[in-house]
Amino acid sequence: MILKKIILITLLLFTAAFGFSQNFNVQELGKAKLINVSGGASANTVFYSGNAAREPFSYFLNGNINFNIANLYNIPLSFSYTNQKFGYNKPVLMNRLSIHPSYKWITAHIGDVSMNFSPYTLSGHQFSGFGVDLTPQGKFKISAMYGRLLKSNEFDSAYPDILPAYKRFGYGFKTAYALEKITLGLTLFKARDQINSLNNPVPFELDVTPKENAAISFETNFKLFKKLQVSTEYANSSITEDLRVVQAGKAKGVSSFLLGRNSTTTSYSAFKGQLAYPAGKGTLGLGYERIDPNYRTFGGYYFNNDLENITVNATQNLFKDKVSLALNLGLQKDNLEKQKESQMKRLVSSVNADFRPNQKLNFNLNYSNFQSYTNSRNQFDYINQVSNYDYLDTLNFRQVNQNLGLTVNYLLRSDKQLKKAISANFSMQDAVNQQQGKAVAGGASTYYNSALTYSLGYPQKDLSFNGSINNTYGQTDAGKNFIIGPTVGASKLFLEKKLNATASTSYNTSYNNGEKQNDIFNFRLNGSYIYLEKHNFNMSVITLFNKTATGKNNDLTATLSYTYSFDKIKMRPKREPRTEEDMNLSPILKINLNGKALEGTRDQITAQLKEMQLALNPLPEDESTNLEHLLTQATLASDDKQFKEKVLDYLETYQTEAENVKKYNNYLSEAARKLESEMKNKDESLENAYVAAIGRVNSHKLHGVDEAAITDKTAHKSYLKLVERSNSNRDQLTRHRWMLKEISALAKLPAAEIQQNPTAVVFSAEQVGEAFKAIKDKKSGPEIIADIEVKMIPFYHEIALKNAKTDEIDLNHIQK
């Protein structure tokens, strides 16, 4: 019967899916042969030597791969495996394999996966099976799942700590429908143990029985008075504790009709409501939550229950956003149905203030107060009913926890050569347990923590240092303890920033009631190397030396990891463009980073990014390839969330490169103006040299004489040399004038328009790589401008040799 229901629900869901996807065309898959493959794999090994109870060697393997077909279909595959034993007493699968294929707004989850429908129904429980998310544009959203929640686990008397378990299967769906002013949601989840999945008998005292669970949740979300946001959720969960019981029973919950009810069937409810109202530059909020005792479902590993919680919160930014305030107040109590021997009430209040008067100084202050009240009845009086006023015979227990924290950060200096900063923090934790208004013996403690940190960095050398002094002072009924010690560390980049090495060491000494307890010394070393942007190697070593009055303990932990990522494995044949109708099926996304806003479908945003990159001129080949790589990764994203993250990664790199392009164009413009000025100063001397050379030619006795009539060979040779020199001066002045004209035209252009000059485009294509390297190496502006100017002279001179003409020379500086 259950299998029939599952098949029917699955068929209905997929029928609905294809009903929504009216533009789905299977033939597109045959036409569009473009296949992109991306993903990565990682391997981690951990070696341990010491006194702790842990394995000496463990490893973790993880991987993911995504097949993107024609930019329409995504088929991601992921896996993980480890030899680590986590000590779980539940038969959950730690080594997983899953794939998540998608097409437009249809995403499937196949393998060992987890889904979240509601915090009161299906909430992250891993299952082996399949699921689907349907998120078309429009009013409907649907999700569904089916799979095995638990493997069967036989009872073994040799391992009494490991509880047996029945094989458990479950299915569920969630749907949301958006009306004009309200959104409605419905979630259903059901799970059932297979009675015959265990062969060995289970001891009665273990209380392990085959169970069944059904849960339903109703959600609403709407606005009142245009600004007040209201959201509510009501859930009901019914559980049959033993399917083998045949005695009939009646459960009152709305979810109980989905179960085969018997005398062990019970129902529980949960409700949560929230109000949020924008006020000024902040918000005001109010929340209420009530969960019945013993509330749980088989769709999660842990559920809060037996509590009533009221919360009030407010946030506000003041004084031109220099001050940020956040206030929270909550009241929580349990024992809602008076079934326990005691009731606990808990009052929670917290204040967080952040003050940033300028870019260099920042203060953060936070305070929280947690108060718990427990009223415990005197059970002897209660049982014997010595009084009709039982509330007079209570034993009041009160616990108060206070936390105070203050952090101050000050930036001493920040420029290209040096960065210096100092920070200080202080915290206090105070706890008091009281009985009948008096402190309980051993129930009071106060701890003070403080630290002072100084950091020093040399950006041009990719080198940084840090040092700190830390101490903890604690006071309890048992005495006083004190811990103090310094920490120093350093970090350095090598091999063109591909190798990052860090090292730190610390030393702590602890005292108890004035007597020295132990000395602890530790040393940490970490190195990471990136090879060809795809291979990432990481190694870390942590050593710990603990010296006490009774002996020494040494620990060593070494971790070695390797990560490989790949992309652009593709076949790129011709593909017909997507139609506008197809484009309209994609959801509209909004992405904003540092004032750069993008809006549209994924394809439209990708097109905008491509246009932005084309406008980024000039750009070295390496930087252009890197941006192409990031853009490709964005297009291969398996869902909209990942797409946004990849686009933000792209935008961060783009903005860095755009800033470098802007700097380069400014430097090129400045070099052109500087060169123009120098060439103008030189123009007169070149013209004078040319005029003098022409004068010497014209004043020679053989000037104008027919070569056939010349008999003085020596004088003729002298005349020819003068002519040769005058021609050389003429050519030099001609080329100089041509270059001056080109450089002057370039110098008159604004830096933002300088790449509109064709000659500048050719020059930049040849020289921008070195200029970018100089910019990223933090060379000074005048130094980069001088380098550009030196390279401009031979570049323009070579073009002048081909283009400068000697038809006519204007004498602009001739003295009359």
Image: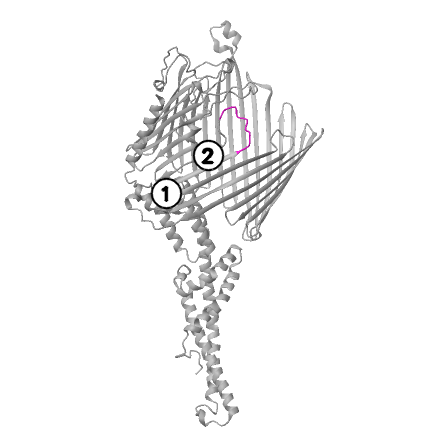
- The quarter of the image holding the C terminus is bottom left
* Amino acid residing under circle 1: Lys
Residue 524 in sight: yes
Specify the label residue 590 is tagged with: 1
* Amino acid residing under circle 2: Leu
Q: Main secondary structure of the magenta part?
A: loop
Tag 1 and tag 2, C-beta contact below 8 Å: no
> Above or below — where is 97 with respect to 782?
above
Q: Which residue is mark 2?
A: 97
Residue 83 relative to residue 126: left or right: right
> Above or below — where is 247 with respect to 728?
above
Q: Which residues are magenta?
A: 82-91
Residue 164 place in picture, x, y as percent: 50, 20
Give the camera-side residue of 4 and 149.
4
* The image quarter in which residue 282 lies: top left
Give the camera-side residue of 678 and 699.
699
Q: Residue at x 48, y 83 (%)?
A: 724
- Which element carries disc 2, helix, strand or loop? strand
Q: Residue at x 49, y 25 (%)?
A: 91
In reply to whether residue 86 is colored magenta, the answer given is: yes
Dot 2 surroundings within 10 Å: few (below 14), some, or many (20 or more)?
some
Residue 590 place in picture, x, y as percent: 37, 43
- Which element carries disc 1, helix, strand or loop? strand
In reply to whether residue 801 is colored magenta, the answer given is: no
> Above or below — where is 722 with respect to 224?
below
Residue 219 place in picture, x, y as percent: 35, 27
Give the camera-side residue of 314 and 335.
335
Mark with earlier residue (1, 2): 2
- The quarter of the image holding the N terminus is top left
